[in-house]
Amino acid sequence: MIEPLQQMLEVGIEKLGLKISAPQVSQLLFYLEILHKWNNAYNLTSVRDRDQMVVTHILDSLSIAPLIEGKSLLDAGTGAGLPGIPLAILYPDRHFTLLDSNGKKIRFIFQVKNQLSLKNLTEVQCRLEDYKPKVLFDAITSRALSSLSDMAQKTKHLLKKEGKFYAMKGCLPRQELSMLSKHYKVIGSHKLLVPGIKSDRHLIEIEFYN
């Protein structure tokens, strides 16, 4: 018998149009359990209910999967590993670097990485503007950070030429878009349809020109 949580996750993934294996579903559910356990002690996220975590964290993170490109991706301000961990589970052939300045969140990500054997994931504790990787990234994702112009300024030293910045937002941030400098080109504004979320969700796709 399929557990309700697993059924909710599998139905949501199907609605997103994603193909995922049974072992990957198990990894996502295990991540959810670790997050729920750690959250009681370390307050990693304001969402406490497991069912709500499936929607707000897992399905919301996976909703951008068909839209992101690149083999090496940085998840900036990853928090509890969102969207980085669900995406790393879905795309084992891509490498994800999860960056956050909060030590307890990075320790949590390290624990998840080891328990799930995510060999395509690297965790980094650092401020975004201070991070100096050896190799620049194809793309950067951001789920809950500051304005587009502020993020673009803080991440421009981390992207390859014509690298892309993917910002997850609620309502379409028209004012933020208008404040971007001429070095950035808005490639797309994608409305995200996340199963279980009625409020607006958007993915803003921006290309950076050196």
Image (tube, rainbow, N blue to C red):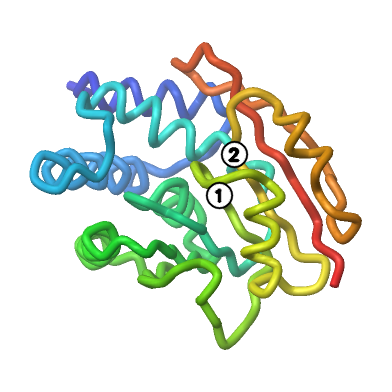
The quadrant of the picture occupied by the C terminus is: bottom right
The residue depicted at 32 percent of the width and 43 percent of the height is 28
The amino acid sitting under disc 1 is Ser
Q: Residue at x 66, y 49 (%)?
A: 166
Is 4 placed above or below 210 here?
Answer: above
**Which dot marks residue 142?**
1
Q: Is residue 210 left or right of residue 104?
A: right
Badge 1 marks a residue whose secondary structure is strand
Q: Circles 1 and 2: CB distance less than 8 Å?
A: yes
94 or 108, nearer to the observer: 108
Residue identifier under label 2: 168
Amino acid type of the residue that numbered disc 2 sits on in the rendered structure? Met
Counting from the top left corner in percent of width and height, residue 37 is at 11, 42
Q: Secondary structure at mark 2?
A: strand
* Residue at 45% in and 53% down: 84
Q: Nearer the viewer, residue 36 or 169?
A: 169
Seen as rendered, the residue at the extreme top is 198
Residue 137 is situated, as x and y percent measured from the top left of the image, at 64, 71
Q: Which one is in front, 112 or 153? A: 153
Q: Earlier in the sequence, mark 1 or mark 2?
A: 1
Height in image: 73 above or below 160? Answer: above
The circle on residue 155 is: none
Q: Position of residue 111 (x, y in %)?
A: 20, 63
Tell me if mark 1 has few (under 14), some (14-19) or many (20+) residues whose alpha carbon lies within 10 angstroms of its own: many
Left or right, 46 with reference to 97: left
Give the percent coordinates (x, y) of residue 170. Answer: 58, 27
- Above or below for 82 versus 124: above
How many marks are shown on the rendered structure?
Answer: 2
Farthest residue toward the bottom? 134
Q: Looking at the image, which residue is at 32% across and 48% down?
A: 23
State the CA–CA distance, disc 1 to disc 2.
6 Å
